[in-house]
Amino acid sequence: MYWTISKITQTLAFSIVATLISLVFATPGMTSPADVRVLVDVSGSMKKADPKAVRGPATALLAALLPDRSKGGIWLFGSDVRELVPYGPVDARWDALGKPIEASIGSTDRFTNMESAIKTGMRAGTQNGSGVCHIILITDGIVDVKGGKNASSISRDRIIKSLLPEASDRNCRIHTIALSDKADLPLLRQMALETDGLFTLLDRPGDLIPVMLDSLELALRSQQLPIRDQQINIDPDIRQLRLIRLDSESGIELKADSKVINSTSKNAGVIYYTGTGYQTLIWSNPIPGRYTLTSDFGPTDRILIDSDVRLELTELPPTISSDQTLGLSASLRSKSGQITALDREFRVAFGNRVDLARSIGNELSMQIDSPTIGRSILTVQSYDKKYERQIQRAFEVLKTQPALEIATDSSKGVGQVASSVKPKSQDAKNLVETVKGQTLLPAIVQEQLPEDMRNWPLWQLAVSALAAIGVLALVVGLVLRPKHHLPE
């Protein structure tokens, strides 16, 4: 390969364009209304995987937490697909769906028609391509349709070869939750990986509610209130407050001066739900002030808010490798733009690390290492004199080995980054080939590159850019150097 001045300069130009476009894509902005579609497995095998039928209260809680102005729908699937809550705008009618949803989710069907479920959820409503749809799939099994193993295998292939590409085209992210290690873990992980979703294998069915909340927060890009010294600060820009407590007999109660907000409150806008394994207090148009929580909130409990003042975090993939360093960038924003406060304090925690990384200023910009392998929660908090905000995002951290090929250990359902791990199925092999062929440049930039440069590795583009900078500096130096005249 010959390195010419024109090619180096051309590469520099495209590298600069790529960088600028990447920065534009990474700029946080106000979010569009959420679109959440829930698919719940009701096949007979669920009697073992979910003996206490946690799917019912988990789905009911999710329905209660979807904010107004969002869209949603819930379907049950087994031998066929049944509509439980019609897809459409979320409004006041959803508030009364808790108990009917719990009562409707059983374990009765003979088959597990996952293909029809995904197709139904993905194609619900009209897709105009302007927003992201999030599909939450809960199952304990494998693709099992009428017609035996051959028909089931064909159905599974259609999911991989047809439905996953369609999901990407429709901008639908599939978050898969396996309630058993007997589920088709390679398929469920592949669904999540190929659509930028989150895969989770539960240790026990009781973990379903917090895991579903994690998936919902990815879909809603939820905002929370941080708890400091058992207190929360409700500012005037908060339209609604949703306090969620899991697996606790203690009720939810807020106190401020003479005001008490709890399950018996007569305040306008206060609704209190008690479901199997959870309690939630919803307060619309809350009275601003600093409130004390009368009992401790656990690590899986949370306080969600609806507000135009948001702590925005750059988009991060929900699946990362254990040797990966994440670049975090966050700022407080409203519809009119960034909100500045030189005294703002950011606090960051990832995984089980107790010590919080701290930063002072208008924006947060820092590098943070991945935690240990498994599921971890990233927590970012923002404090200033007027606003307090918190966001939490769930990540699946995969094991890392020397090379950069993704394969699947089907015995454990653990995706690995390794050249030494051979795919155990043709599907896993296809996934490896797909990932190997991906580029780190946005598609719009890739299309504009000269044809002989499109397959260059990233290091070569970087080196060429640096070389181009050096050449330009040399040329500029020669042109602008001082001219020395000989004495006459």
Image (spheres, grey):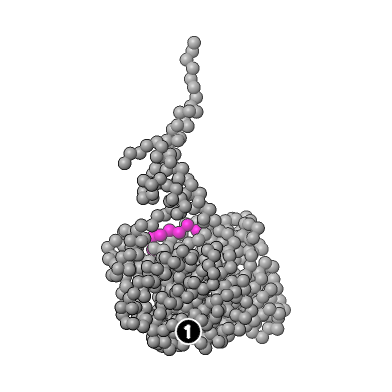
Magenta segment boundaries in residue numbering: 322-328
- Left or right side of 369 for 222: right
Image coordinates for residue 303, horizontal then vertical, percent: 58, 73
x and y, in percent, of residue 202 in the image: 41, 77
Placement of 49 over or under 365, stated as above or below: below
In which quarter of the view is residue 119 placed?
bottom left
Looking at the picture, tell me which residue is in the foreground, 438 or 388: 438
Seen at 54% across and 56% down, the residue is: 27
Can the viewer see residue 282? Answer: yes
Residue 384: x %, y % from top left: 63, 61
Residue at the spot x=32%, y=68% of the render? 427
Name the secondary structure under disc 1. loop
Residue identified by numbered label 1 = 54
Kind of residue at disc 1: Val
Q: Does residue 250 appear in the picture of this structure?
A: no
Residue at the image point whose x is 39% and y is 81% from the top:
112
Nearer-the-camera pick, 62 or 481: 62
Q: Position of residue 418 (x, y in %)?
A: 31, 62
**Nearer to the camera, 438 or 206:** 438
462 over 232 or under it: above or below: above
Is residue 222 found left or right of 196 in the rendered image?
right
